Image (cartoon, helix red, strand yellow):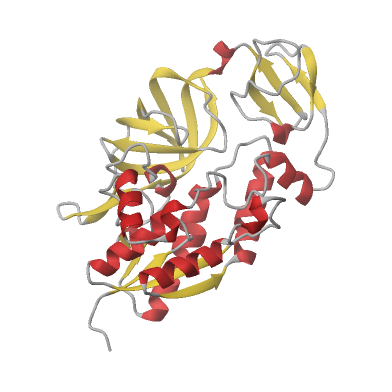
Amino acid sequence: MSNKEKVLVAMSGGVDSSFAAASLQKQGFEVIGVHFLLWRPEPGPGKDREAPSPEQSAKTSAEQVGIDLRVVDLREKFRSRIVEYFLNDYLAGRTPNPCSICNPKIKFAALLELAGEMGARHIASGHYARVIFDACGSEYQLLEANDKSKDQSYFLAMLGQNVLSRLVFPLGEMKKSEVKKDAAALGLESASREESQDVCFVFSKNYADLIEAHRPGAEKSGDAVDISGNKIGVHKGIYRYTIGQHRGLAMNRPDLFVIAIDAANNRIVVDQEKHLFHRKMKVSGMNWMTPLNFPFDCRAKIRYRFEKAQCRVERVEGDAFVATFSAAQRAITPGQSAVFYREDRVIGGGWIERAFD
């Protein structure tokens, strides 16, 4: 029997999770890979059909690292909890953020459960983020990765102390370029594989395909109006649009952007870009990672690739909070995650309900 500390590593088959497993093994852990079956639509024509499946890629990576791999079927949970949420949010006029729900509710929850069954103290993944223990506050803290261009702390803001206390991020201190270089030096096949940038269960770059395939009858046109309610054109289904969208409106006016989505009346509001800017947002469903005294000042990120912006957060009622920005923010979007930071530390995350002034 091994006396090494056991760690379960989520392995997608990509270079990041593969190198994370190899790195932990090098550090002396007893590493066991875990691959989750989530969603595998039929491949498209051409080279996509020849590409290995994520499961095949994960098995290859595990063999190359020299570790065992467990394959866990989460497809039913993923469909009912994540895909249904994704479809419902778009049809309700919101823009969903499935990764921010999938991480705590599906992937890390499953890792923790399996770790309990296998007697593993630690769980790990190839995310670019860091976790440290703050002895003064007796709590674990989630920090941004050193490689800010790859940082994924935004998608991990809904994790609780039960997960953070067990979680290891081997890539948190590394640059992506270093990971690829070191993975190639180890001979990992995943180092040369093209990475996917799409939401993992979307079989097309057009989310509308997924929605129409799973919600027959969803394709319903309606009015496109300006902020005064004047009809400007016709939309092709509210799920095809998101706040701030400019391309694909097909309304013969180059100055139009999607300002709001009115699902109740099956219409979208389109107008000039200046109407996209707001100083306040209401957020709910908050996961605060540390005790806080309200109101307080911090910085918030309203989408993954957006810069953090200075704001003041106050509680308005129950689990609802209002963040007031020092400067108006563009395209605050209902359904997206709002993640709050102090320096490089995540202090909480929740869901944007609406923007206002």
x 39%, y 80%: residue: 118
Residue 212: % across, % down: 78, 44
Which quarter of the picture shows residue 18?
bottom left
Q: Which residue is farthest bottom? A: 1
With respect to residue 247, does 345 lie above or below? below
User: In the rendered view, does 233 fall on the left or right side of 102?
Assistant: right
Front residue of 285 and 127: 127
Q: Residue at x 25, y 67 (%)?
A: 26
Is 263 positioned to the left or the right of 26 in the image?
right
Image x and y of residue 259, in percent: 62, 20
Q: Nearer the viewer, residue 35 or 177?
A: 177
**In the rendered image of this protein, does residue 71 appear above or below residue 181?**
below
Please identify the quadrant where the N terminus is shown: bottom left
* Res. 110 in view: no
Say whether residue 324 is visible: yes
Between residue 13 and residue 300, name the one nearer to us: 13
Residue 80 percent across, percent down from the top left? 65, 60
**Nearer to me, 255 or 309:** 255
What count of labels does the image hold? 0
Q: Which quarter of the figure has residue 191?
A: bottom left
Q: Is residue 12 above or below residue 340?
A: below
Q: Position of residue 333 (x, y in %)?
A: 55, 30
Left or right: 259 as drawn, with respect to 320: right
